[in-house]
């Protein structure tokens, strides 16, 4: 450690550390896939795990080339190795938890070297209890792996340059290359600004060892080039163009508007404030009171780490705001950069910062107390309160109140303790409520069982979106072709009617999915009531129906 870095005054009790670490494993195996992202990512990984193409990701039988395949390889491996023990869904979520834990480890190792053990633990606890980090660690999404690889690429390259250590430096280059295999040029966009700062800070160091950095560039570009060549050879020029021009270049420039998620330049501002909770006031105070002027010590490495974190967090936020396509998930790789600024913003905070942090803790304790003696259930699409006695949540609430009263002079322990306990209580109380709304697996399985034996290949879909296709494939192995054509809508209506009349040569059964209380068939298309083989509620908003075409005897006058 650099001896010139002063120690952090606030210590974190061991029991709070354990509580916060427990949030990484709680809540990953007790619910079905949740929309909008989990069904798609799980279905693609499941296809690879069951013998699908490793070079061309596929969703329900069709190529899906939004992103390179590294995440799907890792998720498929988790399904194959742990799926039989804990289930494919829990195994896939476990990948996100492992990536989150490894991210904490990388951050802690580097922060400990430059900021000291106490400050490094503070950084880890702040990151661990951020709302965005906790969310990412519990979802089947690509971004936890991207967060791990981008964090490794940034911090290990810094460690290698500052300490003149070849191994961390080369590992940083390789992590950046693997990050590209996770999310394409978006990954390099997250890494670009902090790496540019490192180039400025350590330009002379880089010039001294050109061959070492040339080897690093091979590790940086090699994985992406190798996969892209194999992908082009297997998928052909059309799929390659769809991946590169539409999903890489087009999404950044905003020219691929048909792919969705085109937002304005200030879209991320309220989102980042929410993802940083409960620590948001501390980071606002960091900016408002110019905390960047107070370096953590006289050591150049510690000061450079702060500037790196500023470029990583705020620079990345600006870069992502410039891009045309925006989603809240894109912010997750920036969270470790924000966390590295935490010690400077938490130690000796302004009064208003401390007051807001305490107020947020009180707000978190209120729903915990409410769910200790009550819950919510869905009835006819509405949430109905019910009284109950939830002993584990009572324990979490009591521990949170204890942390508030016991650590009045320890703001870090107060906020981290209440935050970690809140996440545990939310997993126990809120996850079952959300699962009632988002659990589509049981209805999907019942619909599939209603399909007559030997007719699986004769089933098509009407208004089945990407999520619905993924859910049916993941839970039942059923591949649905949506016969609705938005461009030739009138012709697709005629074909739907022919399927219901039993005259279509390819399909004889239709699965329709509608939201809210809409009719399951479009206007102008008719089917007899006895043709509806099954109808199920899918969550609280969707209704899925299985309709059979008329047989020959029914068509005769």
Image: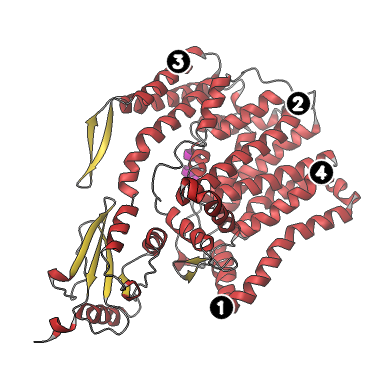
**Of marks 2 and 3, the one in the foreground:** 3
Q: Is mark 2 on a helix, strand or loop?
A: loop
Q: Do the residues labelled 4 and 3 touch (CB within 8 Å)?
A: no
**x 55%, y 26%: residue:** 18
Percent from the top left, x then y, of residue 139?
A: 48, 46
Q: Is mark 4 on a helix, strand or loop?
A: helix
| Above or below for 480 versus 36 | below
**x 57%, y 18%: residue:** 13
Write down the quadrant of residue 482 in the picture: bottom left
Q: What element carries label 1?
A: helix
The residue under label 1 is 238
| Above or below for 360 versus 223 | above
Q: How far apart are marks 1 and 4 (CA)?
A: 41 Å
Quadrant (top left, top right, bottom left, bottom right) of the N terminus = top right
Write down the quadrant of residue 473 in the picture: bottom left
Q: Is residue 268 part of the magenta span, yes or no?
A: yes
- Tell whether 391 sits left or right of 499: right
**x 88%, y 51%: residue:** 207
Magenta region: which residues? 267-275
**Of marks 4 and 3, the one in the foreground:** 3
Q: What element carries label 3?
A: helix
The residue under label 3 is 402
The total of numbered circles placed on residues is 4
The residue under label 4 is 161
The residue under label 2 is 297
- The disc, 1 or 3, on the residue closer to the chain's N-terminal end is 1
Can the viewer see residue 363 in this picture? yes
Q: Do the residues labelled 2 and 4 touch (CB within 8 Å)?
A: no
**Of marks 1 and 2, the one in the foreground:** 1
């Amino acid at each position: 450690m650099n001896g010139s870095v002063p120690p952090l005054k606030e210590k974190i009790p061991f029991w709070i550390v354990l509580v916060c670490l427990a949030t990484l494993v709680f809540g990953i195996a007790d619910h079905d896939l949740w929309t909008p992202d989990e069904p798609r990512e799980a279905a693609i990984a499941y296809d690879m795990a069951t013998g699908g193409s490793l070079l061309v990701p596929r969703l329900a039988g069709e190529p899906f080339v939004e992103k390179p395949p590294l995440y799907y390889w890792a998720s498929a491996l988790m399904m194959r190795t742990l799926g039989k023990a804990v289930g494919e869904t829990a195994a896939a979520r476990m990948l996100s938890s492992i990536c989150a834990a490894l991210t904490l480890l990388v951050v802690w190792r580097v922060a400990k070297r430059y900021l000291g053990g106490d400050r490094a633990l503070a950084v880890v606890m702040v990151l661990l209890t951020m709302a965005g980090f906790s969310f990412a660690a519990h979802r089947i999404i690509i971004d936890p792996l991207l967060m791990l690889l981008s964090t490794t690429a940034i911090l290990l390259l810094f460690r290698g340059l500052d300490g003149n250590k070849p191994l961390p430096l080369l590992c940083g280059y390789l992590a950046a290359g693997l990050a590209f295999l996770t999310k394409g040029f978006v990954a390099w966009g997250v890494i670009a600004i902090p790496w540019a700062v490192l180039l400025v800070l350590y330009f002379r160091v880089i010039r001294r060892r050109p061959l070492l950095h040339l080897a690093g560039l091979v590790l940086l570009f090699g994985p992406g080039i190798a996969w892209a060549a194999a992908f082009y050879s297997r998928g052909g020029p059309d799929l390659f163009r769809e991946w590169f021009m539409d999903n890489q270049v087009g999404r950044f420039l905003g020219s691929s508007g048909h792919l969705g998620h085109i937002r304005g330049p200030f879209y991320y501002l309220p989102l980042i404030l929410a993802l940083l909770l409960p620590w948001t006031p501390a980071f606002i105070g960091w900016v408002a009171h110019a905390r960047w002027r107070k370096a953590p010590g006289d050591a150049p490495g510690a000061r450079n780490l702060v500037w790196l974190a500023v470029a990583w967090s705020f620079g990345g936020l600006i870069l992502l705001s410039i891009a045309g396509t925006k989603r809240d998930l894109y912010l997750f790789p920036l969270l470790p950069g924000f966390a590295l600024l935490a010690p400077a913003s938490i130690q000796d905070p302004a009064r208003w910062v401390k007051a807001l942090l305490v107020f947020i803790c009180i707000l978190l304790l209120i729903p915990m107390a409410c769910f200790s003696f009550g819950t919510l259930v869905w009835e006819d699409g509405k949430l109905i309160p019910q009284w109950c006695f939830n002993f584990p949540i009572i324990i979490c609430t009591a521990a949170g109140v204890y942390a508030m009263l016991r650590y009045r002079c320890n703001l870090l322990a107060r906020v981290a303790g209440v935050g970690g306990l809140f996440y545990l209580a939310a997993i126990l109380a809120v996850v079952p409520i959300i699962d009632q709304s988002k659990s589509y697996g049981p209805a999907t399985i019942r619909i599939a069982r209603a399909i007559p034996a030997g007719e699986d290949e004769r089933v098509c879909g009407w208004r089945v979106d990407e999520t619905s296709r993924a859910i049916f494939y993941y839970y039942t192995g059923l591949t649905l072709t949506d016969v609705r054509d938005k461009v030739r809508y009138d012709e697709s209506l005629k074909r739907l009617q022919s399927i219901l009349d039993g005259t279509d040569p390819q399909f004889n059964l239709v699965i329709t999915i509608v939201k809210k209380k809409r009719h399951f068939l479009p206007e102008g298309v008719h089917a007899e009531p006895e043709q509806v083989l099954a109808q199920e509620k899918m969550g609280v908003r969707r209704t899925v129906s299985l309709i059979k075409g008329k047989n020959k005897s029914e068509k005769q006058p």
